[in-house]
């Protein structure tokens, strides 16, 4: 009987350890085909949140990687957010500053490649568990937009919801 109890307890502990971790950090970067971002290429990211993840605040960032000849000091994108259970995404136009007024790149760089992590929302609330689909669409006047190598999404836990 003791042995059965120990085996059962061990299996329960193992099952609890195998439970998927709660969202602490989500980060995914996608390559821009040919490093020319066209209007019709809309990178998409799916973030699955468990019920316990809704008790937290999150900071949301857009990652951008470009080469030095990128011709602008900023990047305008349309951010589409499709909430769990919704069929139509909410859209918002967002500016990502990439250089200071003197033209110096704000991100970190090696040689002629620069990486930026630009905050787009601080202390965001994900109120419903489920899968959120977030898409980025370049919204500049130039199409295709040259020298953009990668774009990505980062979501990190910021603290407990009040």
Image (spheres, rainbow, N blue to C red):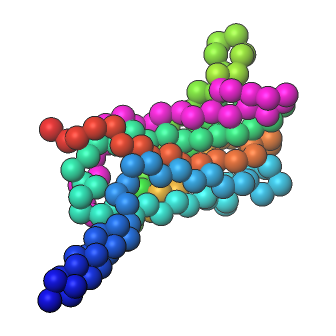
Quick check: is 79 in the magenta stretch?
Answer: no
Residue 57 visible:
yes
Quick check: is 124 in the magenta stretch?
Answer: yes
Q: Is residue 134 above or below residue 99?
A: below
How many discs mark residues in the rendered view? 0
Which residue is found at the position 59% from the left and 41% from the top?
A: 63
Q: x%, y% of residue 57?
A: 28, 42
Q: x%, y% of residue 2?
A: 16, 83
Q: Is residue 136 above or below residue 123?
A: below
Q: x%, y% of residue 103?
A: 72, 16
Main secondary structure of the magenta stretch: strand
Which residue is found at the position 36% from the left and 43% from the top?
A: 157
Q: x%, y% of residue 147?
A: 80, 41
Which residue is found at the position 24% from the left and 58% from the top?
A: 52
Picture quarter with the N terminus: bottom left
Picture quarter with the C terminus: top left
Q: Is residue 1 left or right of residue 70?
A: left
Residue 143 visible:
no
Q: Is residue 96 left or right of residue 126?
A: right
Q: Residue furthest front?
A: 2
Quadrant assignment, res 146: top right
Q: Is residue 5 above or below residue 64?
A: below
Q: Foreground: 11 or 26? A: 11
Which residue is found at the position 57% from the left and 34% from the top?
A: 117
Q: Which residues are magenta?
A: 107-129
């Amino acid at each position: 009987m003791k042995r059965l109890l120990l085996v059962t307890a061990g299996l329960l502990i193992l099952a609890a350890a195998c439970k998927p971790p709660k969202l602490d950090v989500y980060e995914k970067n996608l390559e821009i085909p040919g490093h020319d971002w066209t209007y019709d290429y809309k990178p998409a990211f799916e973030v699955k949140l468990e019920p316990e993840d809704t008790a937290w605040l999150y900071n949301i960032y857009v990652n951008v990687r470009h080469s030095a000849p990128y011709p602008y000091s900023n990047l305008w994108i349309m951010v589409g957010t499709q909430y769990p259970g919704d069929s139509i995404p909410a859209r918002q136009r967002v500016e990502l500053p990439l250089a200071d007024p003197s033209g110096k790149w704000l991100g970190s760089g090696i040689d002629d490649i620069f990486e930026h992590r630009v905050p787009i929302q601080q202390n965001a609330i994900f109120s419903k568990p489920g899968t959120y689909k977030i898409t980025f669409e370049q919204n500049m006047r130039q199409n295709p937009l040259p020298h953009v190598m990668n774009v990505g999404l980062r979501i990190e836990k910021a603290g407990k919801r009040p």
